[in-house]
Amino acid sequence: MDSVQQQLASLPADKRQQTINDLRRQIGYSEEAVRQEHFGFSAPTIEREEEEGFFRFERGRRHGLN
């Protein structure tokens, strides 16, 4: 278990999350369950945004405005 944690810790944040999501799918989590686990109550909203081509995490942040 420690070696897995070390491998994950050595990855950039986006790659680490993708790897965790891939592992979750391999053990039977659905895409929706992975999304729900990661985004919580915002998951349905984020899913709709992505379906429309809007990717909030690819945009720059303007605190207080978005």
Image (cartoon, rainbow, N blue to C red):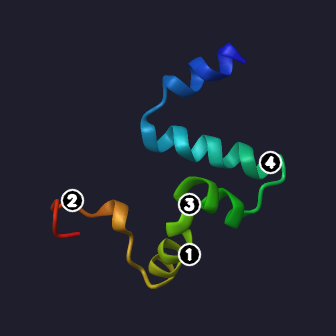
Residue 52, image x, y percentages = 45, 85
The answer to whether the residues at label 4 and label 1 have Cβ atoms under 8 Å apart is no
In the image, residue 47 above or below residue 28: below
Q: What element carries label 1?
A: helix
* Quarter where residue 36 is shown: bottom right
Using residue 3 as the reference point, say whether residue 56 is left or right of it: left
Q: Which of marks 2 and 1 is in front?
A: 1
The label number, if any, that marks residue 61 in the structure image: 2
Contact flag, marks 3 and 4 (Cβ < 8 Å): no
**Residue 12 spot, x, y in % from top left:** 43, 34
Query: Pointers 4 and 2 in contact (CB under 8 A)?
Result: no
Q: Distance between the residues labelled 3 and 1?
A: 9 Å
Q: Mark 4 points at which residue?
A: 26
Name the residue rendered at 17%, 59% in the picture: 63
Of marks 4 and 2, the one in the foreground = 2
Distance from the alpha carbon under mark 2 to that under mark 1: 21 Å
Q: What residue type is labelled 2?
A: Arg
Q: Label 3 vs label 2: CA separation?
A: 20 Å
Residue 53 vs 24, above or below: the answer is below
**What residue is at 33 percent from the left and 61 percent from the top?**
58
User: Mark 3 or 2 closer to N-term?
Assistant: 3
Q: Which amino acid does label 1 sit on?
A: Pro
Earlier along the polypeptide chain: callout 2 or callout 1? 1
- Looking at the image, is mark 3 or mark 2 nearer the viewer? 3
State the separation of the CA atoms marked 3 and 4: 21 Å
- Of callouts 3 and 4, which one flags the residue occurring earlier in the amino acid sequence? 4
Q: How crowded is mark 1: few (under 14 residues within 10 Å), some or many (20 or more)?
A: some
Q: Which residue lies furthest to the bottom in this view?
A: 52
Residue at 83% x, 46% y: name it: 27
Q: Which mark is residue 44?
A: 1
